[in-house]
Image (cartoon, rainbow, N blue to C red):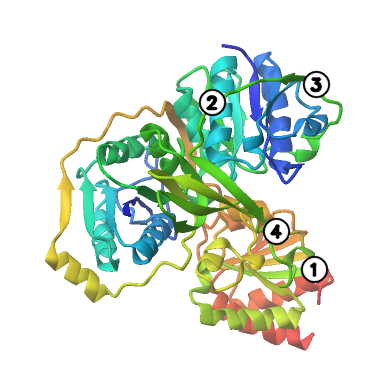
Amino acid sequence: MNIAVLLRAVPDPVEELELNDEGTDLDRDFLGYVLNEFDDHALEEALLIKEDVGGTVTVFAPGNADEVDQILYTALAKGADAAKKLGDDLGLLDAHAQAALFADALSGGDHDLVLCGVQASDELDGQVATLVAAMLDRPHVAVVVGTRPGDGSIRVTKEYWAGITADYDVDLPAVLGIQAAREAPRYVAVAKIRQAQQAGGLEEIDVEAPESTARVKVVEMRIPEAGEGAEMIEGDEEAAAERIVEILRAAGVV
Amino acid sequence: MSNDVLVYVEHLEGAVTDSTFELLALGRGLASVKGGELVAALVGSGVESLAGELGAADRILVVDDERLAIFDPQGNARVLTTLVRDREPAMVLVPYTSQGMDLAADVAVGADLPLVSFCRAVRADGELGATVQLYGGKVEADVVVDADRAVFAVLSGAASAEDGRSGGAGNVEQVAVDVGDLAIRAAGVTLPEAGDVDIATQEVLVAVGRGIESEDNIEEVQELADALGAAVAASRPIVDQGWLPKTRQVGKSGLKVKPKVYLALGISGAPEHVEGMRDAATIIAVNTDPQAPIFGVAHYGWVGDLFDLVPELVDRVEGE
């Protein structure tokens, strides 16, 4: 099975975010990026499928952040067979533009399966996984939490809510939006990533940023005041513990 | 085009979801601003009886196909796309849920409409627009759409489900849609196994998120839960790591809980998590990140390290 995995760099969720002067976007000058966590699960699921039935795993990522090389080399170190960086210094790309980049890179390829994280925190104008599927006119399932590859099709488990799931048989080629891999994403030692870097193997594809077709414009962005409405407890952990026990007592649970 | 607002009716195992009723309540207001009808799209097999719960809508389009007895990501999307192309509603509301995530982008691309995701509020006066939550709920943005029609994928909680619940069906219209050959076939629905602690019935939940850092650290929090006679719950990343079973997951893809006290330790408070716990009577949040959106929903908050706090709490609670 030949599998393509779509990876995106997203603003590090633990970093403090600031807005630009116009208040229409994040201030991206000093922003750190990490691999979208759902894409990490997509990569893991792809590697597990390859271990099950053989084949290849090719990872793709738009070149729109300094961290993208590292993300792609990490994927190679984990076991991907090839890594392709789409463009360089592309700047800010909305979901439609990212999807168009991926769809273009995938069209004409022989991938039986395209795996992508089910969502990313910056997908204002739609989920890239579903947009890619729609652009390529391939069947897709979102919120996938496990796969069992078959012959010409794949059995996938889609998660609904409250522990309810449904299984589907999906004809290949298909696109899957991965919520969680069957197993937690594997760890890879820094030394192995360095080895991958030294071996090279990252292919840069020379493409321009596609024009966006999203038609959604940000008028104003805000960072909500933290703890608005909440009583913020001051002091060290002892003071906090003291106050929290008072609250628990008032709630009648201690 | 029309001035109608079309709501996709999400249902599973014969029950219309709360998300749908929220969209009907939201759509009711939007339809009156637009001066059009509120139209509900009910797709499935043998689902016409559900129309009786959709009295909030002026018109209910029922599409019946036995192959869609279980939600089919491709079949349902084709039906909705066809309805949107044929009826040309000004606004299409889809829940930002497991089903909606299969539909929204497909319909938007298929009907050549813009799509706005993560909507917390939707506006129809003047330009179409929405207020959205981005970056895990850390940022909120007002957006407008450069078109006179659009699809909105709406987060849970945008309106009250109660306001959208109304019996007495509006006009029920059977619509035939040819879904064609399907490349996706449902093989069956699996309901969760009972057995583990039922977190939905607990009075007190001690919930952990990414801030717990490793599986080994859960023991420390379990100690606090034991002292409180509480159960340990978690946000999705912890369950995806396999550190706690699925039965402990709170949020969009887990359970909705309403305990007396919800102690959120190291949980950032992404919208998907908040959806499952915002109705708790008392929410106490602890996080090292003062910007964490969990503090926006909490009643009490402390910015600091959960590993400093938990032993202090265990001592004091055991002393009560």
Image x and y of residue A217, in percent: 43, 29
Image x and y of residue B312, in percent: 64, 83
Amino acid at the residue labelled 1? Glu
**Residue under pointer 4:** B299
2 or 1: tag closer to the N-terminus: 2
Image x and y of residue A125, in percent: 45, 35
Q: Residue at x 23, y 62 (%)?
A: A73
4 or 2: tag closer to the N-terminus: 2
Label 1 marks which chain's residue?
B
**From mark 3 to mark 1, how far is it between C-alphas?**
41 Å
Amino acid at the residue labelled 3? Gly
**Residue under pointer 3:** B170
3 or 2: tag closer to the N-terminus: 2
Q: On the rendered structure, is B201 left or right of B10?
A: right
Which of the two residues, B294 or A131, is positioned nearer the viewer here? A131
Helix, strand or loop at mark 4: loop
Residue density around tag 3, few if under 14, some if 14–19, many if 20 or more, within 10 Å? some
**Residue under pointer 1:** B203
Q: Residue at x 19, y 38 (%)?
A: A207
